[in-house]
């Protein structure tokens, strides 16, 4: 009986790179079940090595090592993980390693060709911009195609979950998520990170261009600490440009010249701007508005209320609402702000 149980055990041994060791220090590592979210084992780094042990492995399940960002499959045997996160020793993990290695090789080749194109002095600026854009589009399409094909071939395998989780950081559109999610297994759909992503995509779907605004309330969102709603500004007969931003966000502050230009040109009976501070302290927001000379209204200390409602996880997020509250545009940046406003207000 002892031999039978031992034959089903899984031992995971690995080494971390010097940079990773410096990043996490003398820390504990955790082996996490990605479907249930349960911690299966823990260990403290011994120098730059770690060891996990799972007894009596019955089902093959997707796992991850936190905080090393290594994903793997639980299966009987001895798995070795190199400093470069190469997985060897068990069948499914070697299959997963091959997928990652092919992706890494393709990405390195793309990055090399992309840099060569950027540095090509024989191309005009117009030619270079067009070519780089085309290369980026082809790169993203290829990565998506590879993930889709891999998931489709592994519908009954925990590799289905690993492939989606690996590709998920590149998903920023509802249409892309839908294309990938259709090839996810039931086990993959149960994964907490996938459930969270599906929820965010549903919020994006409900607040996409063409839909009417979704209201939210910030209990102390006015400067004087009183309650404020998005509907206090949106859907009241004006075009409203809403800037979800924060004082600590460099890219947000780089939009200041375009926002001030838009306000200077169009502010009046038909148009206004509203700032919504996301995960920012009231005093920091107030100080930044003074330094940037923002003349428009602000909603303070919205925390995660606004981002949860509209399904975005990066800022700035700049949106244009019609006088009746319909969403006309999302993700506006730079000159795109003025170009979008011109469609409606130059009439």
Image: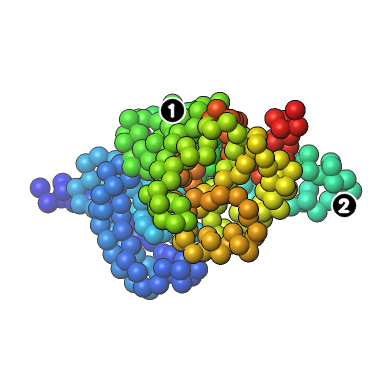
* Residue 265 disc label: none
Q: Secondary structure at mark 2?
A: loop
**Residue sitting at 38 percent across and 41 percent down?**
196
Q: Are marks 1 and 2 in contact (CB under 8 Å)?
A: no
Q: Position of residue 18 (x, y in %)?
A: 48, 70
94 vs 66, nearest the viewer? 66
Rate crowding at label 1 as few (under 14), some (14 to 19) or many (20 or more) other CA atoms within 10 Å. Answer: many
Badge 2 density bin: few <14, some 14–19, many ≥20, Cα 10 Å: few
Decide if residue 21 is on the left or right side of residue 34.
right
Q: Where does label 2 land, which residue?
A: 121
Number of on-image labels: 2
Q: Is residue 41 above or below residue 149?
A: below
Q: Earlier in the sequence, mark 1 or mark 2?
A: 2
Residue placed most toward the observer, 82 or 65: 65
The picture places residue 316, in percent across and down from the top left corner, at 58, 49
Q: Is residue 118 visible?
A: yes
Q: Residue 154: give x, y in percent of width and height.
A: 41, 32
For image coordinates 37% across by 67% down, the residue present is: 49
Q: Residue at x 49, y 43 (%)?
A: 312
Residue 315 in view here: no
Q: The C terminus is located in which quarter?
A: top right
Residue 227 left/right relative to 290: left
Q: x and y percent of residue 119 in the render?
A: 80, 54
What residue do we see at 35% from left, 69% from top? 27
C-alpha distance separating marks 1 and 2:
43 Å
Give residue 183's mark: 1
Q: Tell me: residue 145, above or below residue 287.
A: above
Q: Secondary structure at mark 1?
A: loop
Q: Nearer the viewer, residue 329 or 220?
A: 220
Q: Residue furthest front?
A: 269
Please name whichever residue, 57 or 223, is drawn nearer the observer in this view of the structure: 223
Query: Based on the displayed image, in which of its 4 quarters is residue 94 positioned?
Result: top left
């Amino acid at each position: 009986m002892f031999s039978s149980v031992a034959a089903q055990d899984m031992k995971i041994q690995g080494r971390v790179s010097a940079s990773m060791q410096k990043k996490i220090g003398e820390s504990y590592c955790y082996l996490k079940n990605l479907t249930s979210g349960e911690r299966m084992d823990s260990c403290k780094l011994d120098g730059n090595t770690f060891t996990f042990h799972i007894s009596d492995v019955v089902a093959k399940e997707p796992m991850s090592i936190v905080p090393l960002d290594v994903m793997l499959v639980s299966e009987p045997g001895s798995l070795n993980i190199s400093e470069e996160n190469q997985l060897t020793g068990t069948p499914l993990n070697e299959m997963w390693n091959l997928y990652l290695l092919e992706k890494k090789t393709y990405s390195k080749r793309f990055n090399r060709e992309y840099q060569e194109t950027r540095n090509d002095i024989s191309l005009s600026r117009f030619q270079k911009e067009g070519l780089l854009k085309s290369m980026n589009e082809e790169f993203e399409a290829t990565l998506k195609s590879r993930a889709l094909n891999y998931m489709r071939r592994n519908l009954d395998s925990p590799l289905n979950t690993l492939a989606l989780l690996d590709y998920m950081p590149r998903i920023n559109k509802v249409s892309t998520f839908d294309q990938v999610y259709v090839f996810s297994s039931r086990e993959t759909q149960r994964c907490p990170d996938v459930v969270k992503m599906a929820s965010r995509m549903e919020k994006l779907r409900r607040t996409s261009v063409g839909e009417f605004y979704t209201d939210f309330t910030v209990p102390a969102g006015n400067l004087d600490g009183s309650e404020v709603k998005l509907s206090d500004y949106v859907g009241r007969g004006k075009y409203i440009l809403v800037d979800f931003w924060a004082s600590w966000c460099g890219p947000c502050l780089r939009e200041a010249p375009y926002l001030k230009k838009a306000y200077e040109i169009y502010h009046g009976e038909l148009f206004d701007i509203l700032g919504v501070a996301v995960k920012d302290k009231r005093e920091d927001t107030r100080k930044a508005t003074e330094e940037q000379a923002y003349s428009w209204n602000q909603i303070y200390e919205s925390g995660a209320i606004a981002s949860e409602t509209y399904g975005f996880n990066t800022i700035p997020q700049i949106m244009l609402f019609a006088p009746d509250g319909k969403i006309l545009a999302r993700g506006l940046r730079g000159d795109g702000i003025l170009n979008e406003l011109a469609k409606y207000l130059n009439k």
